[in-house]
Amino acid sequence: MTLEQLSNLSQTVAAVAVIVSLVFVGIQLHQSTEQSRQANRLARAQVTAEIRNSFNDLLRRAFLDAVLSDAVFALADHAKPVEERHVAPLSGLCFNFMGVARQAYELQQGDLIDAWALRDVEQQLFHIISHPRFHALYRAMVGAVDPASITEADRAWVRHINAGLKQYKSNTSGNPYFLAMSGPPEPKPS
């Protein structure tokens, strides 16, 4: 074997070694990427479950509280006005529902929870704030905010909620349960 042949052989062996090491690095990178994806899926599932638990816990606490339960039952009688003692608890309940829904919206915008979880939370929120008395409180809360303190993210979220609420109302307008919750129909002008 000549010196030139040995040189060619060593270059070939070196090239094969480089290719093998690149394949090995590629395999490790693929495994690392797959582990990262699995960790992200697990974290996403945990955050999604936490949002749902937070919302469900809020519902349980709200309806177990005697004052709020009394206020919620008072909503069923549309002939009676909401008493002053119910306004603060109802406003607090509405504010808490909005906070959980806003948190879910922001997490979904960051792709941290699944879209179905956001829809589930929002459907429950829409069901609550579409009731005329809660809706009035929601409008009052939005109207009481100083316009200078509203960020573009706040505006985007309110647009999102208002659009969803409009869609929810159109989807449930023929639903007898929704009609019963909405109270008596308004008299039509003669």
Image: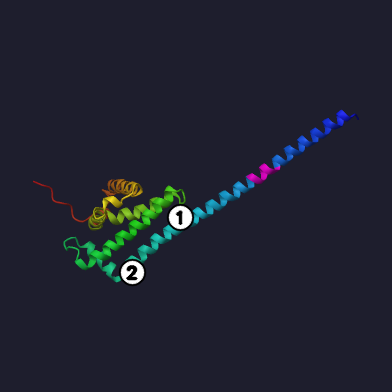
Q: Residue furthest front?
A: 148
State whether residue 58 is above or below residue 23: below
| Residue drawn at (33%, 56%) of the image | 98
**Mark 1 neighbour density, 10 Å: few (under 14) some (14–19) many (20 or more):** many
Label 2 element class = helix
Q: Which numbered marker is on residue 48?
A: 1
The quarter of the picture where residue 76 lies is bottom left
Residue 17 percent coordinates (x, y): 76, 39
Q: Residue at x 78, y 36 (%)?
A: 14
Q: Nearer the viewer, mark 1 or mark 2?
A: 1
Percent from the top left, x then y, of residue 39?
Answer: 56, 53
The residue at which mark 2 appears reads as 64
For the N terminus, give its image quadrant.
top right
Image: magenta residue range: 24-29
Q: Identity of the amino acid at label 1?
A: Thr
Q: What secondary structure is the stretch in magenta mostly built from?
A: helix
